[in-house]
């Protein structure tokens, strides 16, 4: 679905400098030695973006992770998708930020003669649901201009809340089996997932609800995989947080169980940290013999300082009100 006459293909809000480097939108540690580099974890070497594009074109499913608040991650995701199309691909693009229940509204918006990215943002209520629409708008606009299918990948917030509060069985036994959620999670995988959830909530995740949060995370990963499989016409791309694209127990694990003949490639767009210049410093401990990600693409950080320190400062100010 190509946009009508007069609609030029939008470029990501990220430019190349004359020497082939990247003009970052974020400037925190933009001069870091790793910023802009791509690390191939299987071959333990740096590769060029051009080499990465070629390797990604061979995968059935390309999983593009991100730090949600980093605009450079969205710009690089758009660039990857453009390069896949330039190499003959026509992948569907799935978004964690859009819900499967919204697919009818997404389809109606994309079917309009005058397609509007802002209309899509409005009907999917991205801002109201907590996603920073200004950061995602250029990426979604690029996908729309390329005429690629767009799909919501996530469960509804109401369903996720029910899983956290009650039990994953709210999905139903038959659906759990079809999604491969009936398989017991390995102890090491669950240990890492629980630690990641606690860390993501800066230690404030309520212990009594932690089992439900793990169950909800598993259900979401399984649903993301299910949506990828349903959209696999000429491959599919998933846009999601880095935790969802890790190879050992997230979306790729469910794809392996359900479609072992399909290939995946996971790219974690990764913010650099002061004093950490070895790529291995950024690879989280894996639950099995697979590297957590196939590729790391390093970028500056979206904000200086520690995210949890900022979170705790916000809590402190709220308590003082």
Image (cartoon, rainbow, N blue to C red):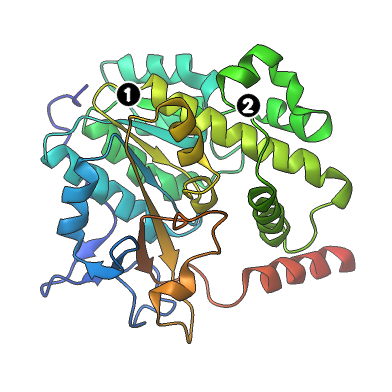
**How many residues crowd mark 2 within 10 Å: few (<14), some (14–19), many (20+)?**
some
Residue 179 image position (x, y, % from top left): 56, 23
Residue 232 image position (x, y, % from top left): 32, 23
Per the rendering, the mark at residue 149 is none
In the image, taking residue 284 as reference, residue 192 lies left or right, namely right
Image quadrant where residue 199 sits: bottom right
Q: Is residue 2 above or below residue 89?
A: above
In the image, taking residue 2 as reference, residue 259 lies left or right, namely right
Which residue occupies the foreground of this view, 10 or 38? 38
Residue drawn where x is 14% and y is 70% of the image: 20
**How many residues crowd mark 1 within 10 Å: few (<14), some (14–19), many (20+)?**
some
* Mark toward the start of the polypeptide (1 vs 2): 2
Residue drawn where x is 23% and y is 26% of the image: 234
Q: Is residue 219 above or below residue 13?
A: above
Residue tagged by mark 2? Answer: 156
| SS at badge 2 | loop
| SS at badge 1 | loop
Name the residue furthest bottom: 275
Residue tagged by mark 1? Answer: 232
């Amino acid at each position: 679905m190509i946009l009508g006459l007069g609609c030029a293909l939008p470029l990501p809000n990220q430019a190349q400098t004359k020497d082939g480097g990247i003009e970052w939108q974020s400037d925190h540690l933009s001069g870091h030695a790793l910023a802009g580099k791509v690390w191939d974890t299987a071959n333990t070497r740096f590769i060029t973006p051009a080499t990465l594009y070629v390797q990604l074109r061979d995968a059935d499913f390309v999983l593009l992770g991100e730090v949600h608040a980093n605009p450079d991650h969205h710009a690089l995701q758009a660039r990857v998708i453009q390069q896949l199309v330039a190499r003959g691909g026509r992948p569907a693009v799935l978004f964690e930020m859009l819900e499967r229940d919204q697919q009818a509204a997404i389809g109606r918006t994309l079917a309009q003669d005058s397609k509007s990215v802002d209309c899509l943002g409005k009907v999917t209520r991205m801002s109201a649901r907590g996603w920073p629409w200004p950061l995602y708008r250029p990426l979604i606009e690029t996908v729309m201009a390329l005429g690629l299918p767009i799909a919501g990948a996530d469960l509804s917030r109401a369903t996720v809340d029910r899983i956290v509060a009650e039990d994953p069985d709210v999905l139903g036994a038959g659906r759990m089996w079809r999604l491969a959620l009936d398989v017991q999670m390995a102890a090491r995988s669950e240990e890492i997932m629980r630690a990641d959830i606690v860390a993501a909530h800066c230690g404030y995740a309520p212990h009594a609800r932690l089992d439900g949060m793990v169950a909800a995370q598993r259900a979401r990963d399984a649903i993301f995989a299910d949506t990828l499989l349903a959209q696999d016409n000429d491959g599919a791309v998933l846009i999601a947080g880095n935790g969802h694209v890790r190879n050992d127990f997230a979306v790729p694990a469910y794809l392996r169980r359900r479609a072992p003949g399909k290939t995946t490639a996971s790219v974690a767009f990764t913010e650099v940290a002061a004093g950490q210049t070895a790529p291995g410093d950024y690879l989280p401990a894996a639950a099995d013999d697979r590297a957590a990600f196939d590729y790391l693409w390093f970028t500056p950080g979206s904000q200086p300082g520690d995210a949890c320190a900022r979170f705790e400062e916000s809590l402190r100010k709220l308590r003082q009100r």
